[in-house]
Image: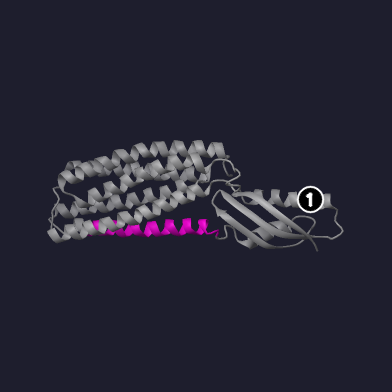
Amino acid sequence: MTAPADVARTGVRRVLALTLGLNVATSVSKIVVGKLTGSLAMVADGYHSLLDGANNVIGLVVAGLAYAPPDRGHPYGHRKFETAATLAIGIALLGLASHLVSEAFSGVAHSRLPAVGGWNWAVMGATLCINLFVTSYEAREGRRLSSTYLLADAAHTRSDIYVTLGVAASFAGSQAGLTWVDGVVTLAIAAFIAVLAVRILVGSFNTLTDRAAIPPDAIEVVVLGIPGVRECGEIRTRGGPGSVWVDLVVRVDGDTSLRAAHDVADRIEVALMQAHAEIVDVVVHLEPA
């Protein structure tokens, strides 16, 4: 069930504040140790985690706006502020991927061999544990709070797990004397980030361009099960997870009284919201059959 706005806002802020602290700690550790040992892949992973922290800061700011109640300027509410911030995550990821590609080619060209030691392995091991926790925690809370931002950030953090494993592989290659491994792993990290960025951008674009949020057939099945409904059509949905608006035309018996027809509309609204917890508003246009 969709969480009330005040509960969702408080919950999102709590999650983001905790993950911000963890992301900053891991990113600083990886960047410092990576630079000291010359590990390009580790530094790249550190910047990736630093971007996680920046996303958390954006989320904390947005959480104060996205869950504000509807007003004259935004009669449909402010949830698309969250979608816009999610879009920013995707754009930032693409920029990071581009930077990593450039760094990787530079590293391969100069045949640098990192001085991998115990600190590298210790930091990456701790990072893996933290990322597993953050990914699970954010995804669970994102579903509970119906927060597209938390779900997107959880997907981003999930990429860190694979990135961390890739960095560990680069450590093994470097210790074996393979100078090209560090740059190749960095390229792989960049490709992974780029794919994730495209997925996030497509999802945000669909929400911002009002792509249908629920298949019309799923709405029609529920509406036709309401006593008094003869037909329904012109079904339109828009929004994103946790905030979907529905408009539809319903035909009832032409001899039905205004009050009875209004009761049918009320039953439709209740039934749809029970069947689809993400629906926040239903507009029923009644016509005689």
- Is residue 283 highlighted in magenta? no
Q: Quadrant of the C terminus?
A: bottom right
Magenta stretch, main secondary structure, is: helix
Amino acid at circle 1: His
Q: Which residue corresponds to the image point at 50% horizontal and 35% vertical from the top-left? A: 10
Which residue ends up furthest to the front in the rendered image? 73
The foreground one among 42 and 73 is 73
Q: Is residue 71 left or right of residue 225?
A: left
Please provide the residue range marked out in magenta. Answer: 184-210
Q: Which residue corresponds to the image point at 34% horizontal and 57% vertical from the top-left? A: 94
Does 198 sit above or below residue 1? Answer: below
Snapshot quadrant of residue 135 = top left
Tell me the element at label 1.
helix
Q: Which residue corresponds to the image point at 56% horizontal and 40% vertical from the top-left? A: 5
The foreground one among 221 and 47 is 47
Where residue 282 sits: x, y (%)?
67, 52
Instruction: Please rate how many residues cluster around mark 1, counting C-alpha atoms within 10 Å: few if below 14, some from 14 to 19, many from 20.
Output: some
State the residue position of label 1.
262
Where residue 264 sits: x, y (%)?
77, 52
The foreground one among 107 and 130 is 107
Where residue 64 sits: x, y (%)?
49, 39
